[in-house]
Amino acid sequence: MPQLQAAQIPVTPFQQNCALIWDAESGRGSVIDPGGDVPRILAALDRAGFQVEQILLTHGHLDHAGGAAALKRALEARQGGAVPILGPDRRDAFLLEDIAGQAARFGITGLENATPDRWLAEGETVAIAGQDFAVLHCPGHTPGHLAYVSTALGVALVGDVLFRGSVGRTDFPYGDSAALIASIQAKLLPLGDEIQFLCGHGPGSTFGAERRANPFLQGP
């Protein structure tokens, strides 16, 4: 079983966790949710020393996708080949098309609208550092939010669906708290208590720890 390596780089004023996942043996990997601060991400990639095969997005919020277009350009220039942006689900298109507008409303500069090279949908798999991750549609925080899960490796990338001791915000016009909790309870937690997850903000956890103690997941 390969031992993938991971690093997180907090980016933007929202301190969103941009994740790097790579296989040191093959020297290949992916960038997940490059929300901004692209020079910092490039510096982290230099330290990690792997070739980026793709940029994955969990959803369309500015702090997760605002640096994707600039990072794609920089990596394609450096590596001399295509670095596609994959995901999220097409239902987040309206958010990706308004990243610059979102940024302006928060007074943040340097973030760009993003256009995926390919939308993703539940039932597909994506290869991260040579390992298959299942694509799960987990709406609620945004309509097209995706999670990427490898039960074989015991790892999940859940974006802003689930946090240590909390869950994603749903106080947006398009948010849906019932859908968010259903996504967690029906799609993520049944995958196994031992699954470790990286999330969009703060430290990660395991599905088991959150099932047992997360106050948002306790029944009436």
Image (cartoon, rainbow, N blue to C red):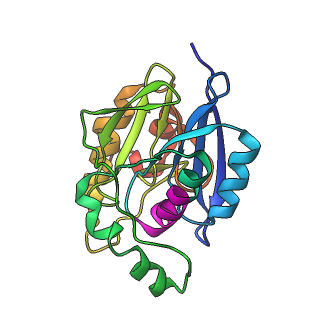
User: Is residue 66 part of the magenta span, yes or no?
Assistant: yes
Q: Position of residue 120 (x, y in %)?
A: 29, 44
Please indicate whether residue 136 sits to the left or right of residue 36 in the image: left
User: Is residue 15 part of the magenta span, yes or no?
Assistant: no
In the image, residue 109 sits, relative to residue 47, either above or below, namely below
Q: Point out the image quarter for the N terminus.
A: top right
Q: Position of residue 199 (x, y in %)?
A: 52, 48
Q: Position of residue 104 (x, y in %)?
A: 47, 86
Q: Tell me which corner region of the image, top left, top right, bottom left or bottom right, holds residue 167.
A: bottom left
Say which of 216 and 219 sits in front: 216
- The residue located at (70%, 60%) in the rendering is 40
- The residue located at (73%, 47%) in the rendering is 46
Q: Tell me which corner region of the image, top left, top right, bottom left or bottom right, holds residue 176.
A: bottom left
- Confirm whether residue 34 shows in the render: no
Please indicate whether residue 133 sits to the left or right of residue 71 in the image: left
Q: Position of residue 44 (x, y in %)?
A: 71, 50
Say which of 125 and 80 sits in front: 80
- The residue located at (58%, 47%) in the rendering is 19
Q: Point out the stretch of residues depicted in magenta.
A: 61-73
Please indicate whether residue 51 sits to the left or right of residue 53 in the image: right
Q: Main secondary structure of the magenta part?
A: helix
Q: Tell me which corner region of the image, top left, top right, bottom left or bottom right, holds residue 149.
A: top left
